[in-house]
Amino acid sequence: MGTTPTPTPPIKEEGSSDSEGEVEERTEGAKSSALLVISANELLEKIEREEEEDNEQEKNTDSDSTHHNEGLRKALDQFEEAISLDSTNLDAYLGKAYVMGLLEDFDGGSSTLQRAEVLSPDDPRVSEMISALQEMRNGKDEEEDDEEDDEEEEEENESKESNAAEGNIPMLVRNGTMTKNFYRVLRVVFEHFDEDCDGCWNDKEVGKFYETVNGESIDHSTLKFLRDHFQTNKKGNLTMVGFFEFYLSQTAGSAEETWNDLQKLGFNQKLEEVDDRYRKLDLSAKKGK
């Protein structure tokens, strides 16, 4: 929470021409003002101790927060009353600005410190409190930015989950079916790795594809998984339909993984080729094979 302002004794004015009664009244006001500052600072110290205990016990409920703010407002009232009793009490201004910062009334705190600066421009505590208040404001701004980022991320995740539940994944899947562009890309990729042009991938061809997107050799358990779950021919070789089935399944589970694969395969976020690794294929001719 920080260090609360330390009160200083009231300064006796010199050269005053006020009557004895007025001087006595002002002196009593200064004493009462100083006592209120002490009381307010003790309350702040108590709030700080309770907050530390709650943090240690990982206890942070709404009722605790309400109690905390009520204590701060009570301290604020005491500082304000202290100022009303003695308008020259610098400690009361510093304390009021500090509490306003804790209550996130940064503009009010700044206004209070402007009065304190006029009252005592050379007192280093004024500049220290100005810096402390600015740090509080910066911390609040960063906290709000983090909350906005979290909200945006949550909304984005909810949107992705909603799209996935409806069978929609932008650019890739619509109503549970691959988009035309995604189909086109997968077909280009499949025919690129189909070195013997027989319309299927043998283990060697699957292995080359797997190494391209994963950076390591394929193992027997992965090959078996592909054969068991996606369409193969009588020889157990993965067909183009099986390849499509695999990517439809993977994309439904993790669109991000599919996009990572596509990037390694040479396609951007618009499903456009970014290099010339793919040979030009006459797809219409291959249909007749």
Image (cartoon, helix red, strand yellow):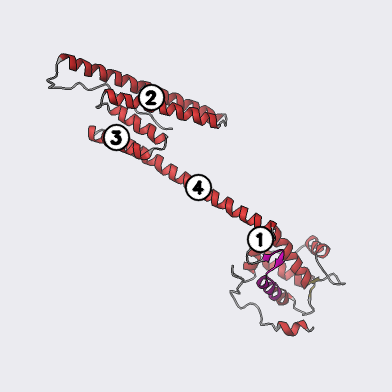
Question: For the magenta stretch, what is the residue range?
Answer: 173-188
Alpha carbons under labels 2 and 4: distance apart: 32 Å
Vertical position of residue 87 compared to residue 265: above or below: above
Element under label 3?
Answer: helix
Residue labelled with disc 2: 41
Does label 3 or label 2 sit earlier along the sequence? 2
- Give the amino acid at mark 3: Val
Is residue 186 covered in magenta? yes
Element under label 1?
Answer: helix
Vertical position of residue 11 compared to residue 209: above or below: above
Foreground tag (1 vs 3):
1
Badges 1 and 3: C-beta atoms under 8 Å apart?
A: no
Picture coordinates of residue 72, whole percent (x, y)? 42, 28
Name the residue at the right extreme.
234
Instruction: Residue 44: name its quadrant.
Output: top left
Q: Which mark is residue 126?
A: 3
Alpha carbons under labels 4 and 3: distance apart: 30 Å
